[in-house]
């Protein structure tokens, strides 16, 4: 039987574009995969999720979607894509999208953001509401939750965090809050002890976030491209990190314009290290390294009414 124990210290255990209708790509062995199929995949994932797949991603697309062809017993990408497109809202769309997202993340990634968040939390009054979108397997919202527990010196801080992602598979992992021990190898002993339980039996080699941390976070599926977002403002902060890089500039702009009216006038927007918000829209002004504030609350309100 597996289980999770309180722990004092958790240590580490440890191409060029092809013309449509070109012959199958050389790497396609098990299934037929033409340049036309690849272009179809690119167009479909761009339309669904905003993800702009580069021309060099054929191998990645082949290997990730081959698993779906195997599961469905299909022989070619053409058959798979035709089946996928048969129903606009069919269940395979979720699998297709999940297969093509890139979910790289880690606890306290881009660490400089977290002291800024802690200072912001301490400077305000009343409960805090945050939205962490593109939250992947959960390391990011749990890092936010840990930071706020520390800022309020309580495992029950007055905080609610909405964590969303388009990928339902990573969301399910995030909601479980179970990680291989080496994922927390870089965390301080104090954080390991305060926020994680160590697995035993079947769960040995794993850690689980403490229930108090888990209870601060509501995990929900959300596509940043969707016409409606089930997100209620006013928010004290939005974390939108390392997802805009997959979108083209007009998509980035549309999303940022929709963030502004959700934020309180003094709220913070945290972006990823290679994502320059002010270059995309002048709605936000730079506050610190990849941290922004809404430039003008009135402007944000006007954009809300549009
Ligand atoms: C590289 S991870 C970034 C994770 C985390 N924000 C971080 O910085 O560590 C990008 C995440 O964006 C999600 N994503 C991609 N397209 C999306 C969309 N249209 N709407 C919401 N999430 C999306 C992916 O599923 C993936 O989990």
Image: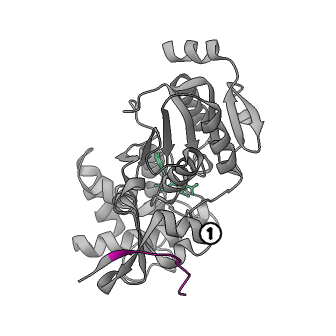
Classify 292 as above or below 198.
above
Residue ID at (60%, 37%): 121
Mark 1 Cβ inside 8 Å of ligand 1: no
User: In this rendering, is residue 208 above or below 249?
Assistant: below
Please indicate whether residue 102 sits to the left or right of residue 287 in the image. Answer: left
Q: Main secondary structure of the magenta part?
A: loop
Q: Please say whether residue 11 is one of the residues in the magenta stretch.
A: yes
Q: Residue 261 or 265: which is nearer the viewer?
A: 265
Q: Taking 197 as reference, is 122 left or right?
A: right
- Is residue 143 within the magenta segment? no
Q: Which residues are magenta?
A: 4-15
Whether residue 306 can be seen here: no
Front in this rendered view, residue 191 or 28: 191
For residue 83, say whether it is visible: yes
Image spot of residue 118 (x, y percent) = 63, 44
Q: Kindly identify which residue carries mark 1.
A: 188
Q: Quadrant of residue 277?
A: top right
Query: Where is 299 relative to 149, above or below?
Result: above
| Quadrant holding the N terminus | bottom left
Rendering coords of residue 183 (x, y %): 53, 73
> Helix, strand, or loop for circle 1?
loop
């Amino acid at each position: 039987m597996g289980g999770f124990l309180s722990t004092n210290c958790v240590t580490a255990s440890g191409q060029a574009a092809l013309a449509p209708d070109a012959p199958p790509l050389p790497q396609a062995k098990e299934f037929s995969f033409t340049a036309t199929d690849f272009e179809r995949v690119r167009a479909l994932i761009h339309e669904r999720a905003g993800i702009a797949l580069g021309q060099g991603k054929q191998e990645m697309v082949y290997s990730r979607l081959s698993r779906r062809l195997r599961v469905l017993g299909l022989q070619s990408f053409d058959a798979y894509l035709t089946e996928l497109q048969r129903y606009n809202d069919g269940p395979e769309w979720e699998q297709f999208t999940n297969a093509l997202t890139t979910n790289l993340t880690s606890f306290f990634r881009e660490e400089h953001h977290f002291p800024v968040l802690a200072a912001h939390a301490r400077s305000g009054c009343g409960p805090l509401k945050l939205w962490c979108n593109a939250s992947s397997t959960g390391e990011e919202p749990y890092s936010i939750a840990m930071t706020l527990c520390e800022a309020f010196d309580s495992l029950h801080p007055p905080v609610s965090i909405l964590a969303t992602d388009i990928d339902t598979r990573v969301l399910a992992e995030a909601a479980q809050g179970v990680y291989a021990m080496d994922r927390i190898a870089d965390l301080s002993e104090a954080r390991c002890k305060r926020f994680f339980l160590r697995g035993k039996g079947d769960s040995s080699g794993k850690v689980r976030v403490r229930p108090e941390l888990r209870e601060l976070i509501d995990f929900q599926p959300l596509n940043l491209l969707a016409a409606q977002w089930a997100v209620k403002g006013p928010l004290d902060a939005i974390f939108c990190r390392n997802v805009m890089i997959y979108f083209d500039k007009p998509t980035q702009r549309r999303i940022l314009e929709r963030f502004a009216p959700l934020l309180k006038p003094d709220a913070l927007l945290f972006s990823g290290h290679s994502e320059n918000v002010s270059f995309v829209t002048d709605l936000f002004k730079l506050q610190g390294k990849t941290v922004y504030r809404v430039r003008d609350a009135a402007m944000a309100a006007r954009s809300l009414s549009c």
